[in-house]
Structures are given as C-alpha cells and as structure tokens.
Image: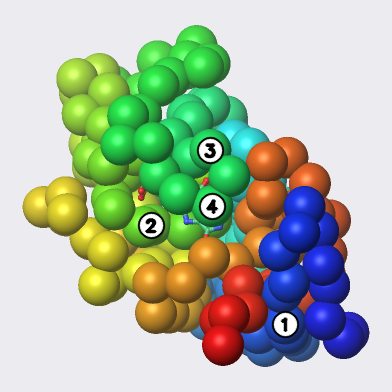
Amino acid sequence: MNELTINGLTFEPYLKESEIMAQVERVASEIKADLTTPNPLFVCVLNGAFIFAADLFRALELPEAEITFIRFKSYEGTASTGEVTQKMGLTEDIEGREVVIIEDIVDTGMTAQKLREVLQARRPKSVKMASLLFKPASLTASVAPEYVGFEIPSKFIIGYGLDLDGAVRNLRDIMVLKETK
Ligand code: IMP
Ligand code: MG
C-alpha cells in the first residue's frame, strides 16, 4: 500500500499484515505457555483491540477460553486527552479466574493502569496484559504489558483496529504518520 492522506494527515506503510500475523502467533504461544487454568477469561478493550483480539483469540486454540469486552476512551485525534473514561463495563464474575487483557496499543499506559485497577477490584486469580503495540518512551504508568507484539517509537499509527477519530480501523496493514519535513 502507498501513502494515505486522511483528515489532512499523510501516513506511510509501517507494518505489513504478514509481519503482524507472525507476532500474533508468537504472543499467543507465549500466553499459552504461561496459563495455569483451562478456562482463562480474555478481556478485549474496545474499540481499538477488536481485530487483534479476534486473531489472537483464535491463534490460542484453547477451546475453553472465554472472551468478553470492556470499553475505554482516552484519545481525541492523534493525542491522548490525559483522561481515561470507561464507556462500557464487565458483566462477568471474574473472581478467582485468570484474566488476560487484550489491548491494541499501550502509549502513556493510563488506560492499562485504570483497567488493571478496575479488574483487580473484582478479585481475579491474576491479571496480565497483551498489547499488540507498545510505545515504551511514552509510558508514564507504573506497569508495562506482559506480552507485546511490537515495541515502537512514540509516533501516531493507524490500521489493524487503530483509528484516526473513528476512521481507518479496517486497514489490513499498519501505517505511521509521516514526519513533516
Ligand atoms: P494510553 O492510555 O495513553 O496508553 O492510550 C491507550 C489508547 O490510546 C489505546 O488503547 C488507543 O486506543 C489509543 N492510542 C494510543 N496511541 C495510538 C496511536 O498511535 N494510534 C491510534 N490510537 C492510539
Ligand atoms: Mg484502545
């Protein structure tokens, strides 16, 4: 795919679908190796993580694993608002269960921290996080994701679930905002 201009911003190719799928498979096998119970609960963070979650959940090949959804929002346009709001909660009883949060990207880590607090309060056996992408240089929260597909620089990216104000989530590849020279 070539460059793409949307809302006046130009993006260039960054990670190909085939590279993404290879990391999804690796992350799935790492998670699987660490699980100690047959029916872990995966918690997909909407909206951004839905495509990664669909691929990761199938790659696990664990017939008794379950998946549920929670919704948080922190971004407007290409930057974090600094405030994380919960838009949709959990209905499951997670007490005593192994829980794995599925995120698209950890940037400041504020969403991740908030999520862990919300889930820990319900007394699960454990809470871990798998994030397809991680921007370590932007992290301000105290915990990093346990499973990471790609560590990337602090640039704005789109595609494979990641949006620009709701658009472009359906790109198969991931693209990065072009530096203005
Ligand atoms: P955090 O709370 O700052 O770690 O931000 C996490 C959320 O912000 C992610 O789950 C994404 O929804 C969104 N986000 C962070 N970086 C990007 C990006 O580069 N592109 C699109 N969305 C992003
Ligand atoms: Mg998100």
- Left or right relative to 44: residue 37: left
Closer to the N terminus: mark 4 or mark 2?
A: 4
Task: Locate residue 23: give its quadrant.
Answer: bottom right
The amino acid marked with disc number 4 is Thr
Q: Where is mark 2, residue-wise?
A: 106
The amino acid marked with disc number 1 is Glu
Q: Give the percent coordinates (x, y) of residue 115.
A: 32, 33
- Could you tell me which secondary element the residue under label 4 belongs to? loop
Closer to the N terminus: mark 1 or mark 2?
A: 1
The structure residue drawn at horizontal position 65% and vertical position 55%, both measured from the top left corner, is 162
CA distance for labels 4 and 2: 14 Å
Q: Is mark 2 within 8 Å of ligand 1?
A: yes
The amino acid marked with disc number 3 is Glu
Closer to the N terminus: mark 4 or mark 1?
A: 1
Q: Are marks 4 and 1 in contact (CB under 8 Å)?
A: no
Q: Where is mark 4, residue-wise?
A: 78
